[in-house]
Amino acid sequence: MGLKIVVIDFGGQYTHLIARRVRELGVYSEIVEPENLERILEKKDVGGVILSGGPRSVLDESIATLDLIFSASPPLPVLGVCYGHQLIAKRFGGVIEKGGGREYGRTKIKIIHRDAILDGLPDEFWAWMSNWDIVVKPPRDWVVTSISEKGTITSMTDNSRIYSTQFHPEVTHTEHGLRILENFLRSVCHIDRWWNPGEQLSSIIENLKNTVREDERVICAVSGGVDSVTTAVILSKAIEDRLYCIFIDTGLLRKNEKENVENTLKKMGVKNLITIDASSRFLEKLKGVRDSEMKRKIIGEEFIKVFEEIASSLPNVKWLAQGTIYPDVVESGKTGRQTALIKSHHNVGGLPEKTTLKILEPLRDFYKDEVRAIAQKLGIPRDIWTRHPFPGPGLAVRVIGEVNVEKLEICREASAIVEEELKNAGVYDCVWQAFAVVGDDRWVGVIGDKRVDGYTVTIRVVESIDGMTADWYRIDYNILDKIARRIVNEIPKVTMVTYAVSSKPPSTIEPC
């Protein structure tokens, strides 16, 4: 194990993206709240610290200055980003102006003095800014290394071990952002590449063996996606036939999901698959419910209830295993008290306060592409680990408004057409996610010379690295035309097809 990078979470929307980029560069990263830093530093395996962005002002009296970082022995390399940039300026005597320079979005950056983290970059480049407060004067004897078009200080250094940027090097909108982070890891922290998620497999399995006692059984939710299948296969290798895989047909799943699950798990040697048809039960619970958060809570709670009923019929079932991954935890607001809730996820946010089962989440510290690397290492079929992400609550979050059988069938069939045509065009593996959405919007059509009041289906295709941010995919019009024609021709009561062209942020990938 090599040295790791600690990312201090101040509640910024890109905190976990920083951690993801560091891992992408071959160094393990761990996100820590400020009050937990002392415990982390005691382990002596920290090679550097990154201070994240955050929604508050460093001029607020309640803000900690984190002397523990700056007084660590031996001294730790530090990189401050956005709020972290301002925090460093405050700590060392710089001047910050509150609300003095709102800059948001792509901003041209000009390098005026090269340092270790700006090495190899062009004199000017585009970067992503998101700030109200600005540093108007650096600490004494510090060097300003770049400025924005408005003359704002956008990076500075103490010329030793502390660096900071007002812009966000971790987002894809910042040109050469990965180079900046890599310069910090290699030239400042002196950490070489060592982290490979596929190589963590043996330790994951060993940890599960030590966690689950020999007289205990585990039930595991499987849905056909890479997260749940990988979780099931890992557990099968760790505890063998003490694992019971449970496939619950909620009525909210993709087309042919049951057959895909059965065939995949059989191929991977997973035993004890129990299939339950609970579709009518879930649909009854969702009747009349329109609010998206309420849908997620209802599905999550009902999901747990079904599992506990199954568990009660099996001897010594003590654990519920879930395919929770890092973005699920992030967007459920479970990573820190300063992180805002975006949406709950039934693997995390829908758990009842009192459950009789303990929770196993062997993948909760991994991002989606890291899970895919683990799945590939396990030998899971390619069509599973290359499969697009699918929401835990299923099609219920792709049906806007009340969920009913008619809208679900439209959503299911339309999504299947979208995926099929992208695969036919060789595009499926090039995008992060592609699916169809249906709501209550109606559009008058003419079918068979008759007036028809039909549904509107929206197609959503996005590009992303890890789902934390995403951009809409500039799809070829011929592909889009074929998808739209098939949906209207093959699915009754659909009279209009639209295409979603909003990025994340400000939108989320899923509609609700």
Image: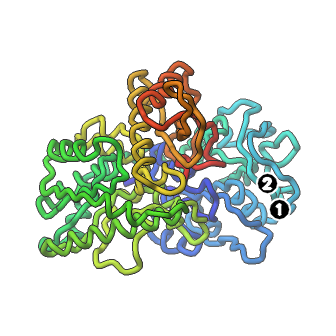
Is label 2 in contact with label 1 (beta carbons under 8 Å)?
yes
> Where in the figure is residue 55, as x and y percent of width and height?
70, 63
How did the renderer colour the structure?
rainbow
Which class describes the residues within 10 Å of circle 2: few (<14), some (14-19), or many (20+)? some
Q: Nearer the viewer, residue 419 or 144?
A: 419
Q: Using the image, determine if residue 391 lies above or below residue 127.
A: below
Q: What residue type is labelled 1?
A: Gly
> Where in the figure is residue 427, as x and y percent of width and height?
45, 26
> Where in the figure is residue 375, as x and y percent of width and height?
29, 44
Q: Which amino acid does label 2 sit on?
A: Trp
- Asked where in the image residue 13 lies, by quadrant, the reply is bottom right
- Asked where in the image residue 325 lies, by quadrant, the reply is bottom left
- What element does badge 1 sit on? loop
Residue 4 in view (yes/no): no
Instruction: Give how far apart the Cα atoms at labels 2 and 1 are.
Output: 9 Å
Split into 4 quadrants, where in the image is the C terminus?
Answer: bottom right
Split into 4 quadrants, where in the image is the N terminus?
Answer: bottom left
Q: Nearer the viewer, residue 320 or 154?
A: 320
Q: Is residue 428 left or right of residue 380?
A: right
Identified at 51% across, 49% down, the residue is: 20
Q: Name the residue under label 1.
A: 94
Task: Using the image, tell me which numbered label, if any, was put on residue 142.
Answer: 2
Q: Which of 123 and 438 is in front in this view?
A: 438
Q: Using the image, determine if residue 209 lies above or below residue 195.
A: below
- What element does badge 2 sit on? loop
Q: Nearer the viewer, residue 295 or 379?
A: 295
